[in-house]
Amino acid sequence: MKKTLVFIAIASVAFTSCKKKGCTDEDALNYSTEAEKDDGSCEFLTVPSSYSFTDEAGNNTVSYSGQTDRLNQLEEMTVYMKSGNATTISASTMMDMFYNVGDNGGGNFTFSSSKQLANKCFSTDSAQYTAWFDSLAVASVDNAMTASNGQAGTLPSGTSTYWFGANGYEYVQLIEKGLMGAVFMNQALNTYFGSGKMDVDNTTPEAGEYYTAMEHHWDEAFGYFGVPTNFPTNTTGVRFWGKYCNARDAELGCNATIMNAFLRGRAAISEGLLDIRDEQILIIRQEWEKVCAATAIDYLSQAQDYFGNDDAKYLHVLSEAYAFVKCLTYVPTETRVITWNEIDTILSGNFGDNLWTMGAINIAAAKGDLENIYGL
């Protein structure tokens, strides 16, 4: 049966929003800012145009440096993994970077940080990613070989060269995009938007800081989105999920929807308006899932175009499609549209263990299932 997500639309946020506490919907329509109603019967929510929040004394209350560190770590891990086209990848080096040994990835990061990807990874899938480190290392031994069914190696496409395992999967894509879900998406949508991080103190600033625990946790969720503070006006430097959200914006209008929800939710927390906060959590979870599904569909569409005429691009985009379908497992179960069985049907039934044997019928089936499930 076809299932369609119901998404809540938000008007573009400028400097104020008419959402409030103690007011009726009619009040909100009649009075759009605090200044227009001064009898004290309503309190309106002021929302900035960028992710910049201060306390009454003008002190910055935003902090998500740990999330920035983890984005940087995955970025540098990806650079190292892609060097496998020319050299042999070390599984132990990947492990050092994943666990951030010595606070500098065993000497492989260009910066120091106490943060790591491993301890924030979805726990039951951590072993899958470290196993892919091993597969990546094994496949890199054959980087001078031409990839074929049963033979790891590289394949050219135009000016680019892609590197595949014997099963046709590009492990760089499985690891990078997979950790985008297992760490970034999972932490934002499950951990930081979950009761353990939202049902916390919101009255007293943390020791030595200007933000409350709840404000800080919301900031950390935002940090995993990977966008500048003035997104989507500014899309320069978008990374990971921010990059894919921006790529889907023409189709979904997701840039403003997600950013506005992050802004409104943070402003609501600062004003103690937790019902509004919860509305924004739902919006972000729903739209983030939709971005993920739409990205998987886009890569499957590309695979249909490359099938039979460019094996390198074909296997490359299929690997990315697989990773984004897997990322759907990290959407919170209470809001996720697609079921575990539907995900398993796509990953096990259509992709399978060997991309060399995934044909046009399998691609069409996987793409059709996602389109029907999400109404795209």
Image (cartoon, rainbow, N blue to C red):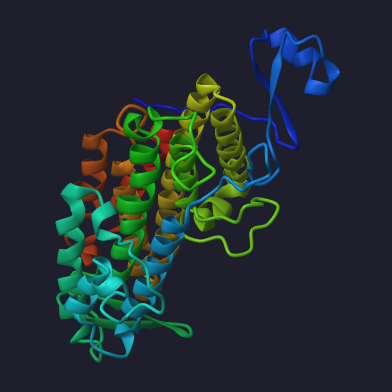
In the image: residue 93, left or right of residue 253: left
Query: Looking at the image, can residue 151 be seen?
Result: no
Query: Looking at the image, can residue 218 be seen?
Result: yes
At which x and y percent is residue 213? 43, 38
In the image, residue 143 sits, relative to residue 219, either above or below, namely below
Which quadrant: the N terminus?
Answer: top left
At which x and y percent is residue 324? 36, 52
Q: Nearer the viewer, residue 80 or 120?
A: 120
Q: Residue at x 61, y 48 (%)?
A: 60
In the image: residue 82, left or right of residue 301: left
Exactly how many numbered labels are in the figure?
A: 0
Q: Nearer the viewer, residue 42 or 59?
A: 59
In the image: residue 62, left or right of residue 132: right
At which x and y percent is residue 107? 30, 82
Q: Residue at x 33, y 40 (%)?
A: 191
Which residue extends farthest front?
208
